Image (tube, rainbow, N blue to C red):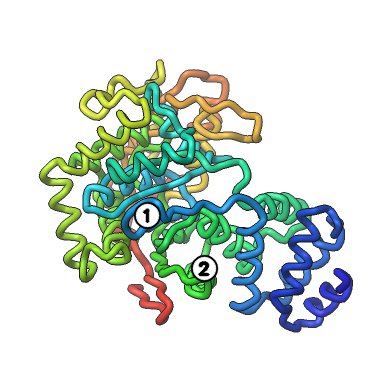
């Protein structure tokens, strides 16, 4: 078997066998297949696409390239949740304790962020003392004892994917749905979940800007999950504006606490209830979404979800008192108000611009070497559909280093589109994708 023959076959639009994909990925991982041949193959995939079978084979090979976590020692059905990323997306911080309080074990490995703000692990590190690195046996033990643990990803999860992604990044082959889908799902499969709930973002602040592309990506990932024996469902949710109001690491922890207390923003609360309901159904503790949603609402109302968050923080060495006293989280020294230049109704907010503004303040990483300031960020005071007057505060910037403050403030101003006409709030969820098809709501 030769790499050049496999490249030629894919270039001509033919389906590759599982053995041919295994040859390429194993050869690339070992160094026997060079970068330039994998780059040529990735470009052929970019133009020709891949079948569901090919994509599943690629996913499994990347999952097998490194550590595979066996969660069988944890009792119950383990349901993982993954978001394709967005601005203000702190749902994992809420869902982990909420779903665990409902009786579904959450054994979640998350990553750090590169871009707008930190990832889930960076956010958790804003809690004083919280340990994101646990030995595997300790990780399993904690989930069996309290139902939940959130840790950083092991360094050897899907090394072939890391290597392939770095190559795609410099060969203009990132925007390939089968390659994106296999990259995401290889990590989920290697992490050992029995079932997977995907939150696929769509809009200006998402990787997929259009609904059609978002649905196509969701279908590809659901197909992979199904083909590899994992129950998988995808929710297509809005990222044409940031999720919730607070953006930045400690700020997002604070908003997660508010949400578990029943005092969070409506959009964030509602999305977590919907995603959590699917996790409960897949986890076998609820018959349908309606029953699951009612149960989750009750767990927030009676304080059980908040208590589970305290348990999680304490179990991993953190200061659980931040749940009752969020002022003990890191806070920036200065506040700067960004005000509306004209009155009207907020018609749109370019989420990506808001994310970049947060990064300029230090909430995210411009490069892998960047050091995040866990205390800085943005408090959005106006969302789509809100009426504002000239001079009203659109956002409050939480700042330690003012060197890029004006640049960030201008990003905020340019992100808002304010019109004289009344505007309806953007839909929160556009579609749900399962193995049986797509249910569209708009």
Which residue is drawn at the image coordinates 47% and 45% (left, top)? 109
Q: Residue at x 50, y 25 (%)?
A: 373
Residue 157 x, y percent position in the rendering: 60, 49
Residue 200 visible, this angle = yes
The residue at the far left in this view is 302
Instruction: Estimate the spatial distance between the alpha carbons at disc 2 and disc 1, rounded to whole Å.
Output: 32 Å
- Residue 51 location (% of width, % of height): 63, 79
Could you say where residue 374 lies in the image, as x and y percent from the top left? 46, 26
Q: Secondary structure at mark 2?
A: helix
Q: Tags 2 and 1 in contact by the CB under 8 Å rule? A: no
- Quarter of the figure that contains the C terminus: bottom left
Residue located beneath label 1 in the image: 347
Residue sitting at x 36%, y 48%: 91
Label 1: state its secondary structure. Answer: strand
First in residue order: circle 2 vs circle 1:
2
Which image quarter is the N terminus in?
Answer: bottom right
Q: Nearer the viewer, mark 2 or mark 1?
A: 2
Note whether residue 343 is visible: no
Q: Position of residue 162 (x, y in %)?
A: 67, 50
Instruction: Report which residue position mark 2 lands on.
Output: 221
User: In the figure, 324 relative to 234: above or below?
Assistant: above
Residue at image coords 80%, 60%? 27
């Amino acid at each position: 078997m030769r790499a050049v023959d496999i490249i030629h076959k894919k270039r001509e639009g033919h389906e590759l066998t599982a053995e041919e994909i295994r040859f390429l990925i194993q050869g690339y991982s070992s160094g026997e297949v060079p970068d330039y041949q994998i780059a040529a193959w990735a470009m052929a995939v970019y133009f020709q696409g891949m079948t569901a079978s090919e994509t599943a084979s690629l996913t499994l090979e990347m999952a097998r390239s490194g550590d595979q976590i066996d969660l069988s020692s944890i009792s119950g059905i383990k349901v993982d949740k993954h978001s394709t990323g967005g601005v203000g997306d702190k749902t994992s911080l809420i869902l982990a304790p909420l779903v665990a309080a409902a009786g579904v074990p959450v054994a979640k490995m998350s990553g750090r962020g590169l871009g707008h703000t930190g990832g889930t692990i960076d956010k958790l590190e804003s809690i004083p003392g919280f340990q994101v690195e646990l030995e595997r046996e300790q990780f399993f033990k904690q989930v069996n004892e309290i139902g939940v643990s959130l840790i950083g990803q092991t360094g050897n999860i899907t090394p072939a994917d890391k290597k392939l992604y770095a190559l795609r990044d410099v060969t203009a082959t990132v925007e390939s749905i089968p390659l994106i889908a296999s990259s995401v799902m290889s990590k989920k499969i290697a992490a050992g979940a029995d079932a997977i709930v995907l939150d696929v973002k769509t809009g200006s602040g998402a990787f997929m800007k259009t609904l059609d592309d978002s649905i196509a990506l969701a279908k590809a990932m659901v197909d992979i999950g199904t083909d590899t024996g994992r129950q998988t469902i995808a929710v297509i949710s809005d990222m044409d504006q940031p999720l919730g109001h607070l953006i930045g690491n400690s700020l997002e922890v604070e908003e997660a606490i508010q949400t578990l207390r029943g005092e969070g923003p409506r959009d964030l609360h509602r999305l977590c209830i919907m995603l959590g309901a699917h996790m409960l159904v897949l986890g076998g503790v609820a018959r349908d979404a309606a029953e699951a949603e009612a149960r989750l609402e009750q767990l927030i109302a009676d304080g059980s979800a908040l208590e589970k968050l305290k348990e999680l923080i304490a179990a991993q060495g953190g200061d659980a008192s931040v749940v009752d006293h969020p002022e003990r989280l890191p806070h920036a020294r200065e506040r700067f108000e960004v005000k509306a230049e004209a009155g009207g109704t907020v018609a749109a907010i370019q989420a990506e611009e808001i994310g970049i503004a947060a990064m300029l303040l230090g909430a995210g990483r411009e490069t892998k070497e960047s050091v995040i300031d866990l205390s800085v960020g943005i408090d959005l005071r106006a969302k789509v559909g809100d009426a504002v007057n000239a001079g009203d505060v659109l956002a409050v910037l939480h700042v330690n280093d003012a060197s890029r403050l004006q640049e960030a403030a201008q990003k905020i101003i340019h992100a808002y589109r304010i019109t004289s006409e009344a505007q309806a709030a953007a839909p929160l969820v556009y579609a749900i994708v399962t193995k049986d098809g797509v249910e569209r709501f708009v």
